Image (cartoon, coloured by chain):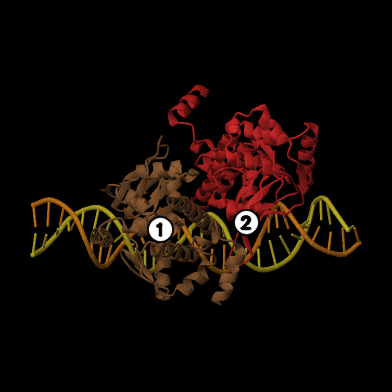
Chain colours: A brown, B red, C orange, D yellow
Amino acid sequence: VPLQLADSTMLFARTGAWPVSLRRLASLGSLTPVDHLLVKQLKPQTLPANSELTRPHDGDAPSWILLSGWCARVRSVGNSERHIVHFILPGDMIGVGPARWAGDRLAVVALTPVITAEARPLSAVVRLGASEHTGLVEACARAAWREQVYCLNAMARLGHQSAYQRIAHLLLELHARLESVGLASRNGFQAPVTQAVLAQALGLSLVHLSRTLRQMRREGAIAFEPGRIEILRPDALIEAAQFPHGADWLEGATDVAALSRLSAEIK
Amino acid sequence: VPLQLADSTMLFARTGAWPVSLRRLASLGSLTPVDHLLVKQLKPQTLPANSELTRPHDGDAPSWILLSGWCARVRSVGNSERHIVHFILPGDMIGVGPARWAGDRLAVVALTPVITAEARPLSAVVRLGASEHTGLVEACARAAWREQVYCLNAMARLGHQSAYQRIAHLLLELHARLESVGLASRNGFQAPVTQAVLAQALGLSLVHLSRTLRQMRREGAIAFEPGRIEILRPDALIEAAQFPHGADWLEGATDVAALSRLSAEIK
DNA sequence: CGCGTCGTTGACACGGCTCAAGCTTAGTGG
DNA sequence: CCACTAAGCTTGAGCCGTGTCAACGACGCG
């Protein structure tokens, strides 16, 4: 686990600040220099693993922007079982955005030590929808949108896929998400979480998850060491996953015609 | 299946019009007489089963309000398997509301013959957020909220529950939803869908669903005939379900203290 | 009457869970 | 520096929940 943290904080220190969050926002909407300043002025702080960033029924939920480490939205079901609804990765925001949705009411916990920033100013701007920040507002709206898409993906995984398929799909999704903020190499990424955590997100038992991961490794589809995962044969995983893992398939502004034209050109 | 339809249309004819939808909206926000008129002026129409009310990537998705029959948001995963994300019941709206969320991009199909009304005028009013319609706007926002809660419930079911538990939870949820619009008796409701449909929503095979339903009947927990389900021992189902089935647990405006006071008074 | 859909039931295979043990690694305190 | 411990991962054995395949009956419809 410390591997990833070190990595992340190094990046954090090296580039000055905010590379992840700005990269994320910029990929979702066009930011002005003022927007950049707005984000950069937020004060980062570190929190230990297992901190609760948000409680289930928080009156006015705090707003955060995650700079390093992984979090998860969780819901406890039954006796002491916790269900991970979806992961929150560096660059993601928590409770920021104009459109609140039901998932916002679920608790958010830090799965690792994290670096976050209180994003109240950002949230306020976005909620006002100031006209000089349309790019920023749009970026936040899209971020919220994606969060929901990841939930829908999780549903499809849980409802209709085998362990192997679920794992394949989740790994591809995580890779795509991390890649979009520059935290993944071409075919690998740091995954600073325990297998138990992945199991909770996939609705599998720890033992079976471990077994299936090993099978994937045996087949040469993936490789992994503690804290890091390599996707050796993306095609194999995509084949197994059976449905799109990016967030684009439900992207707000894209239309079908354009998409099919695009895919035709690629072929 | 015709049982339920006859029932519903009779209700529809008897009470003049719109009892379901108005009841639903009124339960979510306080409506003015003008709001009532606005809803009543929508023109109802009937559509056959399996109609697609919304396609996956519809440019400007149409708005509907469902008056009779059941619909579902579906997503196809893999080869020819369709996943039912959640059910849309009489009184529910489709594509109405200020806050669009990702689920809106999924296709909606009619599971039965349905009576719907094009709700474009309603949608327009809500999207403008006219100040003389705050109650209506709030009602729509809450409706959208609930839709999301039902998705989250589905996730928890799929991720961490056995067949028996999933069925128990879904039945309770459906009962609660139908009861809130006056379409359920104290312990039963019309369920005009095939077991295959329930299986798709629960992520179970048709055969196993059938078996488990029969087991529940054998135990005296439920009773059913084609098109209708009775919950004979709610306590048994609640015990099995293990987590709340109503939409209240995540309700936007309510605070915990008020809720606990309320439940204390009831006892 | 024949047909298709829906529900039911049985037999069987298999995926995934549970229990349990053993292994590595890192952290802790003597 | 070396036990000692705890956390995480792996592996095996066995069981049970579910999926699959297949056959059948009931019902509604043309």
Tell me where residue B243 appears, x and y as whole percent.
50, 41
Residue A117, label in figure: none
In percent of width and height, residue B218 lies at: 64, 44
Residue A50 can be seen in this image: no
Secondary structure state at the residue bearing disc 1: helix
Q: Quadrant of residue A62?
A: top left
Choose between A168 and B31: the one closer to the eye: B31
Q: In the visual, does A188 lie left or right of D17?
A: left
Q: Quadrant of residue B188?
A: top right
Residue bearing the label numbered 1 = A26
Residue B124 appears anywhere in the view: yes
Q: Amino acid at mark 1?
A: Ala
In the figure, is residue B230 to the left or right of B159?
right
Number of residues whose C-alpha sits closer than 10 Å to that of mark 1, classed few (under 14), some (14–19) or many (20 or more): some
Number of marks in the rendered image: 2
Task: Name the subunit of mark 1.
Answer: A
For numbered disc 2, what is the local secondary structure? Answer: loop
Please report the residue visible at 77 percent of the width from the left and 52 percent of the height from the top.
B48
A250 or B265: nearer the viewer: A250
The answer for which chain carries disc 2 is B
At label 2, the amino acid type is: Gly
Which residue position is annotated with label 2? B59
